[in-house]
Amino acid sequence: MYSLFRVCVVTASLLVASVGCYRNTSNNTEPGMGRVGITLSSSRREVLVGENATISALSTDTYGRDSKIEWTATFGKLTTEENGRVARVSFAQPGVSTITAVLMIDGREADRETIEIRVKPVN
């Protein structure tokens, strides 16, 4: 059964307020997999041809399982570092590249996230 939901937890005190969101896009019904997720952040969303973008992945609630991240890019040369948690993409042509990270746990897809990088031509 495929489930898609978002639960946000809001906590507030006199000095600090925080919001945390967990998203489940997994079709896995295994107990404890409901809060497993991946979040991407990019050093830049716009680059010039010849430049690089660095994308970091943060996985949550993997509970010590064998987790890894598989990366793809619609275009650009993609390399990974730090045991697959950081991807660097260099671009030789203009356009919009979609970078996808798939969180695999015990050999099965648990979550996926995408980010777009706009590559502008050098004038």
Image (cartoon, rainbow, N blue to C red):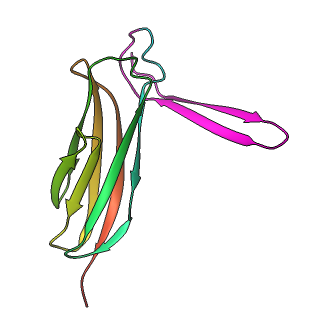
Residue 52 lies in quadrant: bottom left
Instruction: Give the x, y percent position of residue 95.
Output: 25, 70
Hey, which quadrant is residue 30 in on the image? Answer: top left
Q: Where are the magenta residues, as a range?
A: 1-30
Q: Give the answer, above or below, for where 96 lies relative to 110.
A: below
Residue lying furthest bottom: 123
16 falls in the magenta region: yes
Query: Split into 4 quadrants, where in the image is the C terminus?
Result: bottom left
* Closer to the camera in the image, 15 or 51: 15
108, above or below 88, in the image: above
- Residue 61 at x, y percent in the picture: 44, 23
Q: In this view, does 29 lie above or below 114?
A: above
For the residue pair 74 and 32, the one nearer the viewer reads as: 32
Residue found 53% across the figure and 31% down from its top: 22
Which quadrant holds residue 50? bottom left
Q: Position of residue 82 (x, y in %)?
A: 25, 42
Q: Which residue is drawn at 38% across and 61% down?
A: 43
Q: In the rendered structure, does residue 20 fall within the stretch colored magenta?
A: yes
* Numbered-mark total: 0
53 sits left or right of 2 in the view: left
Q: Which residue lies furthest to the right in this view?
A: 14
* Residue in front for this viewpoint, 85 or 31: 85
Quadrant location of the N terminus in the rendered image: top left
Pinpoint residue 70: horizontal percent, then vertical percent: 22, 37
Pick out the residue farthest to the top.
Answer: 31
